Amino acid sequence: MNDKRAEAIRLADLPYKVVLRPGLSHGKPGGFFVSHPELPGCLSDGRTREEALRMARLARIAYISCMLEDGFAVPMPKAMKKPRAVAARREA
């Protein structure tokens, strides 16, 4: 596992706000849709609440990993006492 991936996993486990809503499955009501207001565009879903939340964590890891790889600052959760952004470390 590379350093950026490990950092993405660590950051993804911080207390980001998770919004869980009823969703659609094959065009019919069912399943759950997850969004992360602090991570715009980081979305996921699942057939059950548990699956949706597991998939949401994987989505956070992928989202944050991409931000770090591209050199963008990762927003910290608002639940943290001192909100700040973590700057990506560029390899020399």
Image (cartoon, grey):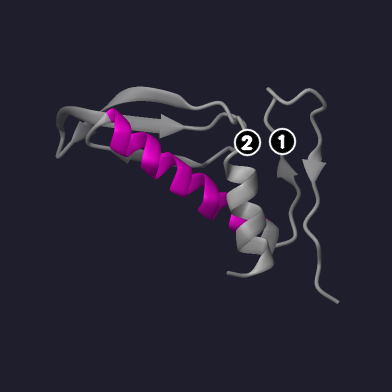
| Image mark count | 2
Q: Position of residue 42 (x, y in %)?
A: 51, 42
Q: Quadrant of the C terminus?
A: bottom right
Binning the other alpha carbons within 10 Å of mark 1 as few (below 14), some (14 to 19) or many (20 upward) gives many
- Element under label 1? loop
Which three-letter amino acid code belongs to the residue tagged 2? Leu
Q: Position of residue 76 (x, y in %)?
A: 71, 35
Among the two numbered marks 1 and 2 on one chain, the one whose residue lies closer to the N terminus = 2
Estimate the spatial distance between the alpha carbons at disc 1 and disc 2, rounded to whole Å: 8 Å
Tag of residue 14: 2
The residue sitting at the bottom extreme is 92
Relative to residue 34, is residue 44 depicted above or below? below
Say which residue label 1 marks: 76
Q: How would you classify the magenta stretch by its main secondary structure?
A: helix
Residue at 52% over, 45% down = 60
- Element under label 2? loop
Q: Position of residue 2 (x, y in %)?
A: 63, 70
Which three-letter amino acid code belongs to the residue tagged 1? Met
Relative to residue 71, is residue 25 depicted above or below? above
Nearer to the camera, 81 or 36: 81
| Horizontal relation, residue 65 to residue 27: left or right | right
Which residues lie in the magenta part? 49-67
Residue at 81% over, 73% down = 91
